[in-house]
């Protein structure tokens, strides 16, 4: 599955874009000043996305990748 397909599937399932998730992650302290908090581990982010949004691991990692700056 392509990265864009992951993003499209996430939007279809949750109604949220990567930007929406970034805003929510900022509220949780995972993102500070627009950048991923270096103290946050990928597992913390993926666990949050799995538990709160019922995303699978691959989909959660795609969102995490957007937090790290991946766009395509």
Image (cartoon, grey):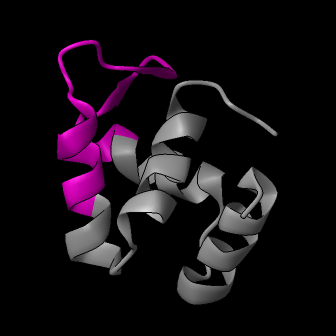
Q: In which quarter of the image is residue 26?
A: top left
On screen, residue 49 above or below 44: below
On screen, residue 7 above or below 70: below
In the rendered view, does 2 fall on the left or right side of 40?
Answer: right
Note whether residue 18 is visible.
yes
In the rendered view, does 40 fall on the left or right side of 2?
Answer: left
Q: In which quarter of the image is the N terminus?
A: bottom right
Front residue of 8 and 16: 8
Q: In which quarter of the image is the C terminus?
A: top right
In the rendered view, does 49 fall on the left or right side of 15?
Answer: left
Front residue of 23 and 47: 47
Q: Is residue 38 magenta?
A: yes
Identify the residue shown where x is 46% and y is 41%.
64
Please provide percent x and percent y for residue 38.
28, 12
Note whether residue 28 is visible.
no
Q: Quadrant of residue 37?
A: top left
Identify the residue shown where x is 20% and y is 73%.
51
Extreme bottom residue here?
Answer: 13
On screen, residue 28 above or below 41: below
Q: Does the magenta stretch include residue 3?
A: no
How many marks the image carries: the answer is: 0
On screen, residue 57 above or below 23: below
Please provide percent x and percent y for residue 28.
23, 44
Identify the residue shown where x is 27% and y is 46%.
45
Please provide percent x and percent y for residue 29.
24, 34
Please provide percent x and percent y for residue 62.
55, 50
Identify the residue shown where x is 29% and y is 53%.
46
Front residue of 20 and 42: 42
In the rendered view, does 70 fall on the left or right side of 32?
Answer: right
Q: Which portion, as a residue range, is magenta?
A: 26-48
């Amino acid at each position: 599955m392509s990265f864009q397909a992951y993003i499209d599937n996430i939007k279809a399932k949750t109604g949220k874009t990567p930007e929406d998730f970034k805003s929510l992650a900022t509220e949780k302290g995972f993102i500070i000043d627009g950048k991923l908090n270096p103290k946050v581990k990928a597992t913390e982010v993926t666990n949050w996305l799995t538990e709160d949004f019922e995303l699978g691991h691959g989909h959660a990692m795609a969102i995490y990748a957007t937090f790290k700056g991946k766009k395509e």
